[in-house]
Image: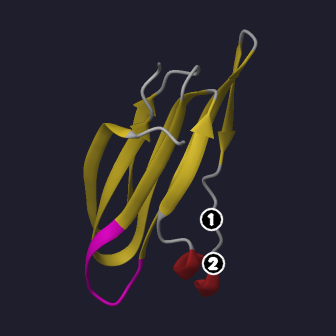
Amino acid sequence: MGRAMFVVSSYWMWTSGTFSTTVTFALNPTRSYLMTGALTGKDGGDYGQVYISMLCTVSGDQVLCGIRDNPSDSSFTDISSLGINEFISSADSVTVKLRATGGLHRLKESCMTSPSW
C-alpha cells in the first residue's frame, strides 16, 4: 500500500515578455519528493516552459549539483515538456525555472513528500 503525499511547498511564478525567473527549494536529502508544475495561464502567441534547471544531490559528504538549464529549442520538445512531474531523492536543493519567449505566462508549482513514519 502506498503512502499519502503532502505538500511541502507551493508557489506561483509569472513572467511577461522574453524573460526567465527561478525559485529554489531547500530539501532534506533523507526524503523523497515529487515535484509537479504546469503552466496555468498564457496570453500571447509565444510560449513558456517550466523545467528543473538545477538539482543538487548529496553523495557521502559532498553536494553535487547538475545544471539542466539548456532545454531543447525544438518545438516538439518544448511542447511535450511544458510541465514537471518528477520524483527526486537524495537531493539537497532543486531550482525550477520558467522561461518565456514573449507574451504573459504563469505557472503553479508544488513540492510534495510522504510523511516519515
Residue at 51%, 38% (x, y): give it. Answer: 33
Q: Secondary structure at mark 1?
A: loop
Disc 1 from disc 2: Cα separation = 8 Å
Q: Quadrant of residue 54?
A: top right
Residue at 44%, 35% (x, y): give it. Answer: 113
**Residue 26 on the magenta span:** no
Q: Quadrant of residue 39?
A: bottom left
Total numbered circles = 2
Residue named by callout 1: 71
Question: Where's residue 17, x and y in %?
Answer: 30, 72
Q: Amino acid at mark 2?
A: Thr
Q: Quadrant of residue 70?
A: bottom right
**Residue 40 on the magenta span:** yes
**Nearer to us in this view, 117 or 16:** 117
Q: Amino acid at mark 1?
A: Pro
Q: Is residue 74 visible?
A: no
Left or right of 85: which side holds 21?
A: left
The residue range painted magenta reads 39-47
Whether residue 34 is situated above or below residue 57 in the rendered picture: below
Neighbours of disc 1 within 10 Å: few (<14), some (14-19), many (20+): some
| Callout 1–callout 2 Cβ contact below 8 Å | yes
Report the residue that reaches farthest toward the bottom. 45
Q: Secondary structure at mark 2?
A: helix
The dot on residue 77 is 2
Q: How is the image coloured?
A: secondary structure
- Dot 1 or dot 2, earlier in sequence: 1
Question: Where's residue 75, x and y in %?
Answer: 59, 85
